[in-house]
Image (cartoon, grey):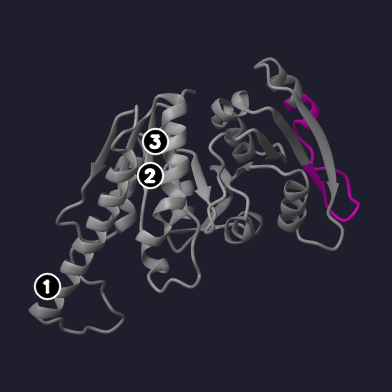
Amino acid sequence: MQIKTILLHMTRRAAAPALLEPACALARHHGAHLIGMAAFSATPPVPPLAIPYSSTVIEEMQQAASEAEGELKEAFEEATREAPFVAEWVQVRGFSGDLVGAVLDQARVADLIIAGQRDPEWELGPVLDFPERLALESGRPVLLVPRDGGVPQRIEKIAIAWNSARESTRAVFDALPLLTAAKEVVIFTVSTHGGPLKGGTPATTLAASLARHEINTTVTNLEQGNASIANTLLDAARQNESELIVMGAYGHSRFREFVFGGVTRDMTNDSSVPLFLSH
């Protein structure tokens, strides 16, 4: 897969620099078309109890949404003004209902989605930040940028979290453009509480396949010990000074809403290392 279309989902001005830097770097390196967008509802959210909104309240909320989008658009255009790649801002106008759907319409035709990690301190986060749904529902890989940024201009050290499942496999081969450009790739597997590794394709077989793409890897098995699997992987990635973790995004359906499985949820909530997610 080549990265020729990148969708950047932006939600708030304070987080814009951390997202724009890797988005522009990847678009520049791959000669990709960069699409920036933000989705704000044109109507107020429906409360648990029927509360009539006055026309003044609705107008104020619409104005606030318009101003927020304007700030993001301005940041995007400023960052891409002199860029050697094509960049465009996609506007969502008159939209009401599921904000995720508006983003997915663009996301499903992108080679890569870039989104920010949830900020638990941001009061609008539960409504406007939904990287997990992009990962689980778009069918496209997602580069999850940590709250504090930390994505280098060139990603040279990559860790793969491997358990041989479909989602893990999808992530690895979606990430080939990044893996082939890296200088160092390590494949991590985790033995849980001294038990045997999960059955399936061995990490050494994956390493052999990647070698045919001229990607040299090392394979490291991690013992879980008393830590969670997520913390075991994160600690190993930090010690290895990995700049990106490639992993499958695991979820299950509950009341028609996708939610992350335990390891994926912990990784996406807590990782200070950028994540490359595929489902």
Residue 86 seen: yes
Q: Nearer the viewer, residue 65 or 82?
A: 82
Q: Residue 21 location in percent, x, y?
A: 45, 44
Amino acid type for the residue under numbered disc 3: Ile
Give the residue at mark 3: 6
Q: At 77% across and 54% down in the image, what residue appears?
A: 232
120 to 165, vertically: above or below: below
* Residue type pointed to by label 2: Leu
Looking at the image, which residue is at 36% across and 62% down?
128
Q: Earlier in the sequence, mark 1 or mark 3?
A: 3
State the image coordinates of residue 91 (x, y, percent, origin top left): 21, 48
Q: Is residue 84 magenta?
A: no
Residue in the image at 47% along x and 27% along y: 29
Q: Is residue 31 left or right of residue 87?
A: right
| Disc ID at residue 245 | none
Principal secondary structure, stretch drawn in magenta? loop
Q: Which residue has dot 1 on it?
A: 59
Q: Is residue 195 left or right of residue 189?
A: right
- Of the two numbered discs 1 and 2 on the same chain, state the one appearing first in sequence: 2
- Label 1–label 2 contact, CB within 8 A: no
Q: Amino acid at mark 1?
A: Glu
| Residue at the right extreme, as displayed | 194
At 28% across and 79% down in the image, what residue appears? Answer: 47
Dot 2 corresponds to which residue? 8
Q: Magenta span covers which residues?
A: 189-206
